Image: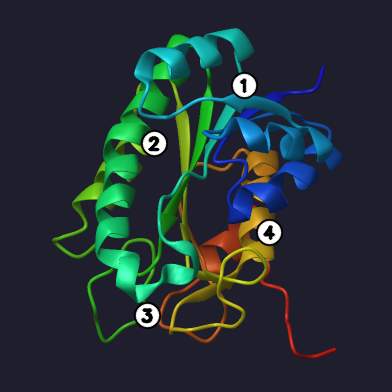
Amino acid sequence: MAETIFLAGATGAIGRKLVPLLIEAGFTVHGTTRKPDRADSLRAIGATPVVVDVFDAEALKAALLRVKPDIVIHQLTDLPFGLDPAQMEEGRIRNARIREVGTKNLVDAAVAAGTRRMISQSIAWSYQAGISEITEETPLVEGATAVRTLEALTLTTAGIAGTVLRYGLLYGPGTGCDAPSGAINLHVDDAAHAALLAVQTSAVGVFNVVEEGGPVSNAKAKSILGWQPFRRGDD
C-alpha cells in the first residue's frame, strides 16, 4: 500500500515542484492551501487538496486525523514574493510565527494522528560565521529563535522521526528570483528533489541543502541522502 503524505504548503514554490515528484514516486499526497481557489490546481497535479490554515489548530488537527498520514512534510513559509525588501520586515515577523506557532500546531496534529515521520524546511544562512567550513554541527546565531523552535519541534518530538532540510536562498521558477542572489543558494528544483530523497531514504537529522561553492557544506546531504545539486549553465 502506498504511503500517505500530508504536505503543508503544497502551493508554495517548493510544494508545487514536490507534489508531482511524490506522485510519480508512488506516494498518496494530501496538500494544504489556505485559499479555496487553489484547490483545483492541486487536483490538477495529482494531490488531494486540504483547505486549512496552520494557525487554526483544531481544524488542522481534524484534517490530520482524517488523512492519518504516514509522513508530514512542512514546507510552509510566509515571505514576500521575490523577497521584496520593502515587505521583508513584516514578512520576517509572519514567517517567524509560522516557524513557531504553525510548526507547533502541525506537530501536535501529527502526533494526534499517529504520524511517524516529519520533514521540515529550515534555512542554511543562520550559522555563526567562522573561519572553517560550515557544517550541520556549526552553531546557529543567537537570534535564530524561530529557526531553533521549528527544528527542535521536528527533531525532538516523541514518537516522530524528524528530518530538517536547511535550504539555501531559493531561486528559479515561482520564487521571484531568477538567479542566485547571495553566497548560499539553491535552485527550487533541487530543493524539491532533496525533500523527495529525504522521504525515500528515511534519513533523520539535519541536512544542509545548498549549491556548491559557498561557505556551507552540503557533503552530508550528498553522502546520506544521495542528493546532488544540478549543474546549471553547462548545457
**Residue name at image x 43 percent, y 49 percent:** 77
Q: Amino acid at mark 1?
A: Asp
Give percent across and percent down for residue 124: 40, 66
The numbered mark, 4 or 2, whose residue comes first in the sequence reads 2
Residue 147 visible somewhere in the drawing? yes
Closest to the observer, 39 or 5: 39
The residue singled out by tag 2 in the image is 154
Check the image and name the residue furthest to the left. Answer: 142
- Residue 70 marker: 1
User: Which callout, 2 or 3, points to the residue nearer the camera?
Assistant: 2
**Residue name at image x 62 percent, y 14 percent:** 67
Query: Dot 2, crowdedness within 10 Å: few (<14), some or many (≥20)?
Result: many
**Residue name at image x 40 percent, y 82 percent:** 215
- Residue 133 marker: 3
The numbered mark, 3 or 4, whose residue comes first in the sequence reads 3
Give percent across and percent down for residue 39: 69, 32
Q: Amino acid at mark 3?
A: Glu
Residue 132 found in image quarter: bottom left
Q: Secondary structure at mark 3?
A: loop
